[in-house]
Image (cartoon, rainbow, N blue to C red):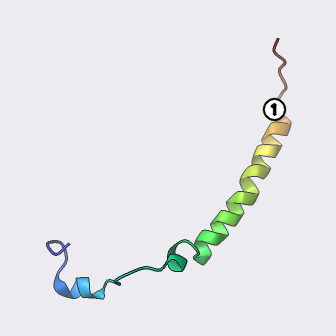
Amino acid sequence: MTGIYNKEQLDKLPDMLSFTDTVFSTMNLSVSIILLITLPGMMYFIGKKALLKTTN
């Protein structure tokens, strides 16, 4: 990355990002909870509206 950024820009970058800052951030947790609730609920209601077809 030394050819892309200069020394001052590289010094501003953190050495490491913690797991809690990325995976367990507030945005990631809220989106995951919303999806875990809404997607199965939507599939349930879509399944109730679908017509049943019997096959032999």
Question: Looking at the rendering, in which quadrant would you find the N terminus?
Answer: bottom left
Q: Residue furthest top?
A: 56
What residue is shown at x 85% (from left), y 25% (from top)?
52
Residue behind mark 1? 50
Looking at the image, the residue that sits furthest to the left is: 3
In the picture, measured across the screen, residue 25 lies left or right of residue 9, that is right
In the rendered image, residue 24, in percent from the top left (x then y), is placed at 59, 75
> In percent of the image, x 51 and y 76: which residue is there?
19
Q: In the image, residue 4 lies at what x, y percent?
A: 18, 72
| In this view, 47 is above or below 3 | above
Of residues 55 and 45, which is closer to you in this image? 55
Q: Which one is nearer the viewer's eye here, 1 or 43? A: 1
Count of labels shown?
A: 1
Query: Residue 12, relative to residue 43: is it above or below?
Result: below
Q: Residues within 10 Å of mark 1 (few under 14, many from 20)?
A: few
Residue at x-position 81% and y-position 38%? 47
Q: From what the image shows, is residue 6 above or below residue 38? A: below
Q: Is residue 54 left or right of residue 26?
A: right
Disc 1 marks a residue whose amino acid type is Ala
Q: Secondary structure at mark 1?
A: loop
State whether residue 37 is above or below residue 16: above
Residue 23 placed where, x, y %? Answer: 55, 71
* Residue 13 appears left or right of 20: left
Image quadrant where one finds the C terminus: top right
Q: Quadrant of residue 44?
A: top right
To which quarter of the image does residue 28 belong? bottom right
